[in-house]
Amino acid sequence: MATENKEEETAVKRVKTPETLRGMKDILPDEQIYWEYFRRRAREISEAYSFGRIDMPILEDEKLFVRTVGKQTDIVEKELYNFVDKGESKVALRPEATASAVRAYINHGMLNLPQPVKLWYMGPMFRYDRPQSGRYRQFHQYGLEVIGGADAVIDAQLILIAIKLFEDIGLKVKVEINSIGTAVTRQEYKIELVAYARKHRKELCEDCTRRLARNPLRLLDCKATGCRAVMKDAPQILDWLDDDSKQHFMTLIEYLDEISVPYVLNPHLVRGLDYYNRTVFEVVPDRGDDVELGSQSALAAGGRYDGLVEQLGGREETAAVGLAIGIERAILEMKQQGVEPPPLPRPDIFFAQIGAEARRLALRHFEEVRAAGFNVVEAFGKASLKAQLEASNKVDARFTIILGQLEVQDGTIIVRDMESGAQETIPMDQMLDYLKKEMARK
RNA sequence: GCGGCUAUGGUGAAACGGUUAUCACACCAGUUUGUGGUACUGGUAUUACGGGUUCGAUUCCCGUUAGUCGCCCCA
């Protein structure tokens, strides 16, 4: 019978194990210590600043993103993870969460809550682009949104929170800020910028020639030396701001100075989503001034989106500002900068058993030990004591409880000190007292 | 979407047209059936997938897929 099965197995075509989809990743237990560290710190700081947690659906109506992020943007045009569902609806996996948060704000009448409404979220986002370092098709963002407040003090505090969180997880970062004004002034500026760049067309790189028509603001942060030289004397967006935006930006800077946030003014900083206005900012790693950072270097980004609520059908003139942190990138940078997340606590006790009877009892007594507050582990699936002591040693337990046939008969257990190797037989009913005493002694 | 590099057990590597694909670590089982951190024994791979060249391919060629790096773009 057994040989028959074996033959059958080899004869049948070998099952091919499915792989994860492109750009998708399993986050394994070893990796989770970084994730847990980030999650914990993020949750703590969110609560400390009175943000309320919100979880939005991962799947939304495609329109939500097309209308807010912008039809022309790459995020929508080529990276949207969209499909038609069984009910013939055009849906999309969310590429970011701000649009969903604003939708939720409107849907649930949050305008009736004390303003501004402060929300935080954490979860997977999806962009269908080509994976590379620090970029996946499914990635995770932690984000904050403050909806219903226009004052620059909110922008300042949000930037402060971002910096604090990065500090909390041990990262050295710097913040770059800029203001991109309103849609109207930005349009005027674009025209001016394109006019200027046209005059220097021959000096621009190939990409920038293309950008000229498609996405002229991107000319500003091109890394090609020729373009850089041209852009040095280009008109600056700050000079095109309307008076209110200018005032807002200056106030923001005053606040940042007040709380000693070390920011860098970057007049070339722009954002890739249409809904942004006024304040925009980016958090990048600080690895010393002369280190050239790669293009996937932004750990977090954010800005004001004063028109978005109205655009999605909410009340007029509901100002808002938000930020998002790329968790994979933050973790990547933690490794880069050598940040060690706190290790898992060392187990106090390993519970070993020998024999069927002992195993039954062990299963029950394990619960007693655990309920008493000890960090206790087991390997009930293993039979030999040797294998269990090996396992105990591997997890670095301080004591091993040994329960065998003999002990079951006598109503005792053995407690072995894993460092000295000394062991003592004690009555079962004194187990917890003995363990407490021993643990306290160490 | 475009270009470079890569693809051998769970992990990291070796072999390189030619007999049972080598090693280390990890994992599992065991070394007279109840004692770990050491030693020993054994087990664990149709060399990513598909095609081609060849008497013969893990090794050469092409394609696909995936990873990786850069570009575009973005967190």
Image (cartoon, grey):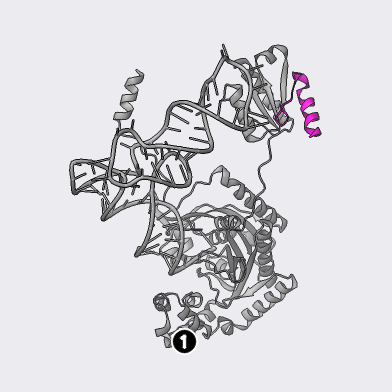
Query: Residue A138 placed where, x, y %?
Result: 48, 53
User: In terms of depth relative to the viewer, which is nearer, A386 or A245?
Assistant: A386
Q: Is residue A148 visible?
A: yes
Left or right? Give the position of A223 relative to A439: left
**Quarter of the rendering occupied by the N terminus of chain A:** top left
Q: Is residue A72 visible?
A: no
Specify the quadrant of the image occupied by residue A161: bottom right
**Quarter of the rendering occupied by the C terminus of chain A:** top right
- Residue pictured at 42% horizontal, 79% vertical: A212
Q: SS for tag 1?
A: helix
Provide the residue span drawn in magenta: A417-442
User: In terms of depth relative to the viewer, which is nearer, A90 or A166?
Assistant: A166
Residue A337 covered by magenta stretch: no
- Residue pictured at 71% horizontal, 25% vertical: A416
Specify the quadrant of the image occupied by residue A45: bottom right
Residue A428 covered by magenta stretch: yes
Residue type at mark 1 is Tyr
- Residue pictured at 67% horizontal, 26% vertical: A366
Query: Residue A192 placed where, x, y %?
Result: 48, 85
The residue at which mark 1 appears reads as A196
Query: Residue B51 placed where, x, y %?
Result: 22, 46
